Image: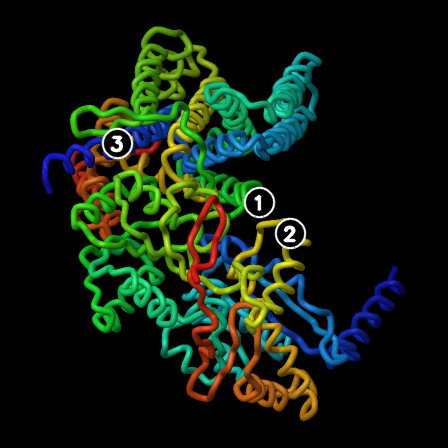
Amino acid sequence: MDATIATFLIQDGLTNGAVYALLGLALVLVFSVTRVIFIPQGEFVAYGALTLALLDGGRVPATASLLICFGLLAFLVDLWTMRRGTSTAAILWSVLFNLALPAAIYAVTLGIAPLALPSLVKALLTVAIIAPMGFYVYRIAYRPLADASVLVLLIASVGVHLAMMGLGLVFFGAEGLRARPLSAGSFAVGPLLVSAQSLWIYGATIAIIVGLYLFFEKTLLGKALRATAVNRLGARLVGVPTQFTGVTAFLLAATIGAVSGVLIGPITTIYYDTGFLIGLKGFVAAIIGGLASFPVTAIAAIGVGMVESFTSFFASSFKEIIVFGLIIPVLIWLSLGAGLHEEE
Amino acid sequence: MAKYIAIWTAGALALSFGNPTLADVTIGVTVSSTGSGAALGIPLKNSVELWPSEIAGEKLKVIVLDDAGDPSIATTNARRFVNDDKVDVIVGSALTPASIAVAGVAAEASTPHFSASPVPPNISKGKWTFVLPQDAGLIARTLFAKMRADGAKTFGYIGFSDSYGDLWVNQYKAIGAEYGLEMVADERYARPDTSVSGQVLKIVAARPDAVLIGASGTGAALPQIGLRERGFIGTIYQTHGAVTFDFLRIAGASADNTVFASGPVMVAEAQPDTAETKKDGMDYVTTYEAKFGAGTRTQFGAHIHDAMAILKKAIPVALEKAKPGTSEFRNTLRDAIETGGPFPASQGVFEYKADDHLGLDERAVVLLTAKDGKFELIE
């Protein structure tokens, strides 16, 4: 091993670590606000990458019609909860969000998918298709359980994960797809070959981290989310609508997932079930961050990427074991430090 | 209301006792149409739909179940086949661990079994199991001979971190020395990995003459692309698992200067007319692609066609001696498969023997290269 190989490995670890960081942040965000361990986070990554790959081929991605199904289901759930009387305004809002919005996105996709679009437009369209799914997933699976225990929410997450993975197999098929990079080409920095796509990844990760920081520090909604994270009951008592903060958290998580998918889709082959493994690596980072700290999670994710990159060089057959083994000492450390935790 | 219930019950009873399908030849198929082996299982399942509805005047009853590649589900499926459905033949599964599980049940219930995936030698020596895909030894000998002919003395290996990946390293350890080859790197990765940069760097640093990739489907494209990105210009050798059109779609231009060992069905059209595998191969490819679209053929699906090619000849022999659904029928059918060869099929000419349930020879392997997004036969 010489310096050239080391710099290649560091670069590779940084690129993957940046994506894990995005997922880790989304997991921490969702958990702290809604107490949901969001296992399906990885599915949004896979959906995003596969949708982009299909758009590259000039095809209408099945996720667009899936979005309509999700919206319809959410609408039915809405109707069921409103069966004991409701207002016209509530029904109108429901129609708007659950039926009109996905239909509009579908129509736009149908219209512009066959055109030879610039990569950035395709990427934005992908995010627009995937992000609302976070809202519907929350509406269908989690909102009815909002006050359930962490364990029940975790089991619901497993269910959502399995359902979304199965739908992925139906809609995308079993073979992998690879998207085209947002901008092709690469340039040499000394001995290092930096691809333009990896710059997109670093840029997007930094932008999202800064964006999240500003959102939580400067906006009222962000502060409401933080209040919910600190104490749900207290937040509700001072007038924070916890349902609304939950929706926001899921929407943000799905958006981050879709962006990660768009970023990672061109650098590797993505399968319908790839998302789970990527999500798990983000989860390792989130655990190291105690499912609470954003900065620790981001740094830990870069660490996970580095460890993965270097173990793939030195002991490729033990790569996953080493990466997931990272969790054990952290859990021991956390359980020693935190004392007894009572669930609220 | 009670009257209706009585009628329905009577009807159901009559159906279950006077089962008109009892004399049909029943085949149970278990494949992984979901789960991690779905890319292999789905073409298998599709190919079952192309089976004829009868053989020698006997109706065929086919039951297809999904085992998700899980050996325990495969066992349950196989038990259902032998206990409830009283099948005459079991076919499956698409993944090695599940096939091993099915073989166990088949041996216990004395039912002929076609494995659609390679199995280890202790399983393929079993009395009731017949293997459809090419044995790893056959493919490895072809690839190693080609490496030697191309002048390669050292090679780097990168393969799946599972039994498929181990298969090729074991073959190298067993026979590599005969071909004067030395393996200078042994790297592993998993199909859902997002990067193989570390492994690829290590291989390139070892400066091998050639690289052997032991992976399947589009999963084999990741190291292929990685090696080319890192400037490896030597020949890359791919096993038959990688020979799919999806692989070429993903790998694109980086698939140049690559040698693939493959079953002949992938280039059925390009075979000389004298090839014994041409007629069956063309039959399968044209009917499959007519139904599922051009460029959808896979080698995995062809194994299902080949099982039927064998049964078409073996079932009439067994029918002369016994009735389907009986243990005599299963016994005579097994004997007919073992001794009735050769059976020319799409992926090779099967000639099973009492001590050889692999049944294939060199006619089952061709060497291919990729050019402009297509596979081409190497003469």
Mark sitting earlier along the chain (1/3): 1
Residue B217 percent location from the top left of the image: 44, 52
Mark 1 Cα-neighbour bin, 10 Å: few <14, some 14–19, many ≥20: few
Q: Note whether residue B17 is visible.
A: yes
Q: Residues within 10 Å of mark 2 (few under 14, many from 20)?
A: few
Three-letter code, disc 1? Val
Q: Nearer the viewer, mark 2 or mark 1?
A: 2
Indicate whether A227 appears above or below B319. above
* Residue drawn at (30%, 50%) of the image: B189
The residue under label 2 is which amino acid type?
Phe
Colouring: rainbow
User: Which of the two marks, 1 or 3, is nearer to us in this view?
Assistant: 1
Q: Secondary structure at mark 2?
A: helix
Subunit bearing disc 1: A
Element under disc 3: helix
Q: Is residue A106 above or below residue A226?
A: below
Residue A249 falls in image quadrant: top left
Which residue corresponds to the image point at 41% horizontal and 71% vertical from the top-left? B135
Name the spot of residue B2 as percent of width and height, x first: 87, 63
Which residue bears the numbered disc 2?
B292
Residue receiving disc 3: A301
Write down the residue under mark 1. Answer: A170
The C terminus of chain A, quarter of image = top left
Q: Are marks 2 and 1 on the same chain?
A: no
